[in-house]
Image (cartoon, coloured by chain):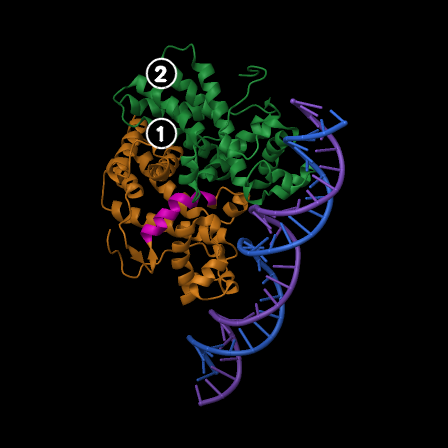
Chain colours: A green, B orange, C blue, D purple
Amino acid sequence: MKTLIGQMQIQVNEKIYLKDPNSSDLGKKIVSQGIILIDEIGLENFTFKKLATRLETTESSVYRYFESKNKLLIYLTSWYWGWQEYQLVFSTSNIPSPEERLKLAIDLIATDIPPNEIIGNVNLEILGRIVISESSKAYLTKEVDAANKEGFYSAYKRLVGRISDIVLEINPKFVHSHTLISTIVEGIHHQKYFADHLPSLTDIKSDSQKLGAFYTDMALAIIKK
Amino acid sequence: MKTLIGQMQIQVNEKIYLKDPNSSDLGKKIVSQGIILIDEIGLENFTFKKLATRLETTESSVYRYFESKNKLLIYLTSWYWGWQEYQLVFSTSNIPSPEERLKLAIDLIATDIPPNEIIGNVNLEILGRIVISESSKAYLTKEVDAANKEGFYSAYKRLVGRISDIVLEINPKFVHSHTLISTIVEGIHHQKYFADHLPSLTDIKSDSQKLGAFYTDMALAIIKK
DNA sequence: CAAATATAATAGTATTACTATCATTTATAA
DNA sequence: TTATAAATGATAGTAATACTATTATATTTG
């Protein structure tokens, strides 16, 4: 999982941005530094003005790439899920046992990203952190339905869909595969957040192995029931 | 569950507000109409100015009760969890079987609040809706740790703690009771949101009975494993 | 080298998220 | 009943946010 294909590119729905941030230097900086700034000050305090100042550019230049900070967030999370999907496909490709593949999938979601893992100047560890604490805000808005219609959440849905398919391989009669997997994915992120900030809501303190193991056990217990 | 005790009062941590909204007419309206307005336009678009206009009062008057809209949100969610806790204690009080109590607890979380259920001019159905779509924003902020230290999330933690205790009655050796219950509570809310807005992430379309049944099955499967 | 494209500089607007002051109304208690 | 306190209303003000618009200046590409 360390170095994948040298020049991999994650595809993100074009409607999310005004101008492809991958098409220019400034665009790439907006993404890579945007991640860092959101992580530092939180999405609520993050503004395009502050980002522009940090990049020594102007607010209007940033607005040429993204319509709003929520769109930037949607871009970042889509990118993240696209990357996770890529890793899922990659890491499960030669594994015949669906049970083994499910375990790998859940561990993939649960595993902490090692520090300084970079793809195209995106720091994945930091991106992983903002996905945990901010990603739900990308869909918990009054604009969900419009955004969903545009396909802004398709990367996430695809990942959940793929893991659900593995569940169905294990038990084709299990009718709650999507519910189960979306519960597990959100659950893992929540538990990590709780471990750091609201520890009495969890029993697993920053041990991604145990976290993955718990959810794998839970999944298999209900799937095979 | 229809009419409980006529004049029940849910206690909310005093530090959440500047002035007790229950102590005056205006305060009560801020809460009851605040809920309605947040539901209508979403937390992002909600402002104290808009609420003041609707109440035919002034922004500064609203600010006398709550420091910020985030505090109002914390107040509303605390109130909600306090109310859920009350109902939990009430509905499980005479049930000896912990398994039966767990089922009741999960169903309580999953059950849709019937329309027009009112306690002290708070519309619970609407409050339930905003808890689903906005409550996580109460803790997904840079101020979590400070807020947690002040005890702003204790109502939620207490509810999770109580249900976890039931889990431990069923199996005292189960070491993931908090993880399991917080996963289920958040999971139920997410699934309801998904059913309405991102249906491909769920298999249960607005059927709170099935939702409760699924999570109960899942809980028992892992607890007894 | 011209033309297109990208960025910088600057300005401007309505709204947000507050804080402050002072006048007026309403409740309470002596 | 009146004095006093408490709550609300009216008004003003400020820095920041979330944008849009315009024009000038670089930079790239054909």
Q: Residue at x 37, y 31 (%)?
A: A183
User: Is residue A132 toward the left or the right of residue C10 in the image?
Assistant: left
Residue B174 - label = 1
Instruction: Locate residue B168: give its quadrant.
Output: top left
Secondary structure under the numbered disc 2 in the rendered image: helix
Q: Is residue A6 visible?
A: yes
Q: Vertical placement of A56 versus A177: above or below?
A: below
Q: Please name the residue that numbered disc 2 is placed on.
A: A99
- What is the x, y in percent for residue B27? 43, 63
Do marks 2 and 1 share a chain? no
Task: Residue at 56%, 37% (x, y): give it.
Answer: A66
Q: Is residue B98 left or right of residue A16?
A: left
| Amino acid type assigned to the residue bearing label 1 in the image | Phe
Q: Is residue B218 rendered to the left or right of residue A106?
A: left
Subunit that carries the residue with mark 2: A
Q: Position of residue A202 (x, y in %)?
A: 43, 35
* Residue situated in front as seen by the camera: A23 or A10: A23
Question: Which residues are the magenta region?
Answer: B124-137
Of residues B69 and A59, the one nearer the viewer is: A59
Q: Residue at x 49, y 53 (%)?
A: B69
Q: Tell me if residue B14 comes above or below residue C7 in the rendering.
A: below
Residue B175 visible at all: no
- Which amino acid, by three-letter code, is at mark 2? Glu
In which quadrant is the C terminus of chain A drawn?
top left
Q: Label 2: few (<14), some or many (≥20) within 10 Å?
A: some
User: Does the magenta-highlighted stretch encompass residue B46?
Assistant: no
Mark 1 lies on a secondary structure that is loop
The total of numbered circles placed on residues is: 2
Mark pair 2, 1: CA separation: 23 Å
Q: Nearer the viewer, residue B45 or B185?
A: B45
